[in-house]
Image: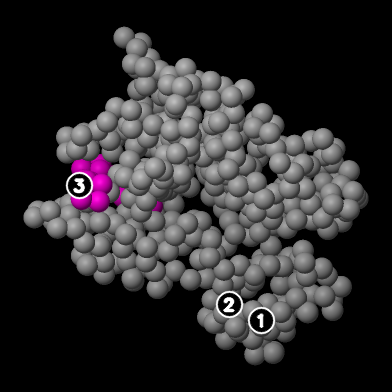
Amino acid sequence: MSEKIIRDPVHDVIVLRTDRPLEALLFRLLNAPQVQRLRRVRQLGLASLAYPGADHSRYSHSLGVMETARKMLNRLRSLALIDPQREAICLVSALLHDLGHGPFSHVFERISGLKHEQMTRQIIEDENGDVSSFLSDFDPQMPANVVAMLQNKPKRSFFHDILASQLDADRFDYLLRDNLMTGSQYGGFDLSWLIMAITVDEQSDRLAVTAKGISAVEDYLQARYHMYRNVYFHKVVRSAEGMVKLALQRAKRLAVQERLTWPPREHVVHKALLGQALKPSEFNDPDDISIMHCFKIWAEGDDPTLAQLCRGLLFRKLFKVIDISALDESQARDAFAKASDIIAKSGGEPDYDLFLDEPARDMDESFESADAILVKDRAGKVSGFANHSPLVGALNRQLSFRRIHLAEQWRDAVRQNLHVLGSLP
């Protein structure tokens, strides 16, 4: 027996037996260049500027999702017939689900237009790439089957729910991993008991929890709420993300005007900024390191706007915050317009010196959709989670922020003028 043992901070020991074909495939995939690139893409972007330990990668998360999916399938094996082929597709999909994420994840995606789902599919289907080769060696239909699984085809089942649902291996792992690596103490929940409580609703072929799992689900939803409130929506994290977006927007504008001296036109980052399609082989290059290298060069460049943003990101001179959460949406937009006008009249650049942040708009899904969690009672009757717990609605109502993030030199003047104008409570 040949074992590959990986020590993981969340799941402790992860064992892959290479004398078993499926586990041998998973280990080969872990060492593919396309998966190894994820070591150089941080799971939480620049969250380490608020939580210094949050430097973990999408690679470790992908490994954790695979292991969590294995635990869920092992639990369901005693309750439902687990088809070996679909199990293999599910575990491979769990490992590869983030394959197409670029540097700084969603921020880079919005600027470049390169959708991570599309890039994931292209990498898996690329016949010249190691991932597709390894999958095809295992089963010639495996690349197509994995892509179909990630797209919820041909018909959604509990296998798909393990990958993407309100109770999926992805959320389970990133909440526990992000909680541990940030040291926040907000996102812990009892994964072992939650997995023991999952079951399958035979009629819909969907994942469900038994009544004994209701408290565990509440614990999980509260952990998710606290992680959004205290980590993902932390004002420093949001300032850094906003500044990355502004820096990339500025670089994109300069590239369109042919004024961006670095990187050269043939460079993958330059192509991505211009929204040009990338070949799967080219996607082995873009990572956090390549973008941070650009920030270092741009910080010393001849465009003062881009240079200031990059220096702020490199040396933690981040935008300051004026909290306007007490204002409604109309009042908030009016306050932001006034702040922009104040900065413009003072000689600043409103396009790059401030931004309005409403982080709840960036949540993966609202807590109201957590009612999609199915609860199966002893008689086999299935109902939505809200019928068993008031927690869903309460959490959804409480999670709301509105903030103006702006360069430090404008904070006092803007705050003072908004008070004078009656825009702040």
Identify the image quadrant of residue 93: top left
Q: Magenta segment, which residues?
A: 187-205
Measured as percent of width and height from the top left, residue 384 is found at 25, 62
Q: Is residue 267 left or right of residue 142?
A: right
Q: Quadrant of the N terminus?
A: top left
C-alpha distance separating marks 1 and 3? 53 Å
Q: Secondary structure at mark 2?
A: loop
Q: Residues within 10 Å of mark 3 (few under 14, many from 20)?
A: few
Q: Which label was assigned to residue 335?
A: 1
C-alpha distance separating marks 2 and 1? 8 Å
Residue that appears at 82% across and 46% down: 298
Q: Earlier in the sequence, mark 1 or mark 3?
A: 3
Relative to 402, residue 26 above or below: above
Magenta stretch contains residue 334: no
Q: Which residue is mark 2?
A: 324
Q: Are marks 3 and 2 in contact (CB under 8 Å)?
A: no
